[in-house]
Image (spheres, rainbow, N blue to C red):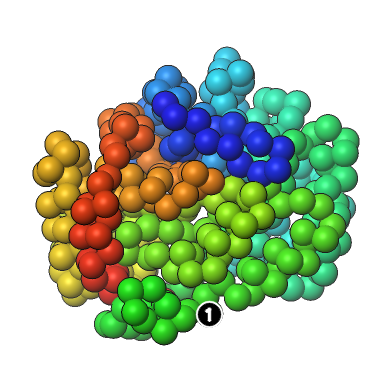
């Protein structure tokens, strides 16, 4: 698989990563299988998907334990990325950016991951009660101590777990394709400017997909201009852009899609033209809609690494193959004309 570099340290990873969250948290409880997920981890590594993206809150903690089982025998093949700063309780998710906690969280992650270093340590979400410079300074000390190789900021922590709200029926205005500019990432950009003064940012992780391209406006250019890697979260739209979900299908209560406005029957039906467009492009290349969606993300820049999440070996293999798909300028123009995804949190 093609290799890409992230951050000033020029750390190399496979062009497509593996999001490990669905193996332990956020999706269908009844389909979780430790052994099946372990096979998926090995299959992804076999195909060059070296970046394994996890977090201490997934489970909580069980996701890192699972990844640690793979790292125990495949550490040299993997680039391990985990996150700190969020605590998952029974009813609420809260931020904790206190320096002492961050350092304890890192030590705990190292134990669960069965490794002596974390390749990329990401702040899952800034704590509004703690100046972000203090949190980032504590993380920088972990680099100095040799426990962490590089630091990243995650700008998606709250979006995937927000409580249900009334869905919008119109696309979000976003400053691309002729629409007004979105202010979605303004806070993240301010945070990045502040922490960059403390210690270099190696990566930013935020949502980027065919139906959610807001990061293209300012966040992605900010990263590119500073040599910062961009990890594209949810590049398959929580599975919708694969074309395998049907309007009206149900989701189990613990599945995050059960309370996501884009996954109501109405919005899933309204968004079918997006998948249909990806399917048309894929037909010209013998590729699936999901592979086209991942290839589109890859085409946004050499510093961009999509991190599709899955717990199934079949999908991990299919996602990896997307790295071989080269979209033409005609393909990209056709995708640019597809409608924005409908249904939003606000």
Using residue 205 as the reference point, say whether residue 31 is left or right of it.
left
Q: Please, is residue 119 above or below residue 167 in the view?
A: above
Q: Residue at x 33, y 74 (%)?
A: 177
State whether residue 187 appears in this view: yes
Report the residue marked by disc 1.
183
Which residue is outermost to the top? 73
- Disc 1: CA contacts within 10 A as few (<14), some (14-19) or many (>=20): few
What is the tally of numbered marks visible in this picture? 1
* Quarter the N terminus occupies: top left
Which residue is outermost to the front? 329
**Can you give x and y, in whole percent of width and height, for residue 112 in the image?**
67, 32
Using residue 323 as the reference point, say whether residue 20 is left or right of it.
right
Q: Nearer the viewer, residue 142 or 330?
A: 330
Using residue 270 as the reference point, say whether residue 169 is left or right of it.
right
Q: Residue at x 70, y 26 (%)?
A: 115
Q: Please, is residue 295 above or below residue 87 in the view?
A: above
* Quarter the C terminus occupies: bottom left
Q: Residue at x 87, y 39 (%)?
A: 144
**Can you give x and y, in whole percent of width and height, for residue 254 in the image?**
40, 57
Q: Please, is residue 287 above or below residue 249 in the view?
A: above
Using residue 150 as the reference point, say whether residue 18 is left or right of it.
left
State whether residue 255 appears in this view: no
**Can you give x and y, in whole percent of width and height, for residue 14 in the image?**
49, 32
**For numbered disc 1, what is the local secondary structure?**
loop
Q: Residue at x 81, y 52 (%)?
A: 199
Q: Nearer the viewer, residue 57 or 243?
A: 243
């Amino acid at each position: 698989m093609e290799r890409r570099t992230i951050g000033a340290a020029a750390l190399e990873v496979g062009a497509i990563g593996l999001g490990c969250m669905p193996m332990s948290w956020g999706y269908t409880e009844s389909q979780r299988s430790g052994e099946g997920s372990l096979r998926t981890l090995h299959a992804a590594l076999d195909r060059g998907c070296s970046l394994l993206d996890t977090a201490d809150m997934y489970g909580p903690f069980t996701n890192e334990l699972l990844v640690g089982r793979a790292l125990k025998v495949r550490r040299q093949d993997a680039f391990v990325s985990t996150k700190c700063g969020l605590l998952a309780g029974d009813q609420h998710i809260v931020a904790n950016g206190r320096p002492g906690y961050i350092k304890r969280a890192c030590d705990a992650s190292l134990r669960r991951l069965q490794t002596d270093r974390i390749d990329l340590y990401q702040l899952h979400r800034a704590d509004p009660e703690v100046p972000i410079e203090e949190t980032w300074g504590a993380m920088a000390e972990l680099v100095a101590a040799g426990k962490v190789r590089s630091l990243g900021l995650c700008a998606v922590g709250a979006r995937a777990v927000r409580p249900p709200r009334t869905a919008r029926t119109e696309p979000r205005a976003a400053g691309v394709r002729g629409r007004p500019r979105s202010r979605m990432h303004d806070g993240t950009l301010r945070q990045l400017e502040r922490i960059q003064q403390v210690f270099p940012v190696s990566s930013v992780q935020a949502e980027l997909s065919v139906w959610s391209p807001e990061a293209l406006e300012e966040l992605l250019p900010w990263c590119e201009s500073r040599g910062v890697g961009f990890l594209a979260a949810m590049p398959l739209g929580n599975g919708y852009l694969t074309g395998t979900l049907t309007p009206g299908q149900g989701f189990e209560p613990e599945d995050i899609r059960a309370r996501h406005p884009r996954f109501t029957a109405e919005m899933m039906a309204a968004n079918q033209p997006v998948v249909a467009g990806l399917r048309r492009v894929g037909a010209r290349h013998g590729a699936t809609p999901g592979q086209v969606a991942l290839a589109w993300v890859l085409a946004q820049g050499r510093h961009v690494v999509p991190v599709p999440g899955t717990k199934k070996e079949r999908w991990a293999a299919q996602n990896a193959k997307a790295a071989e798909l080269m979209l033409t300028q005609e393909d990209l123009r056709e995708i640019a004309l597809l409608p924005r995804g409908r249904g939003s949190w606000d």
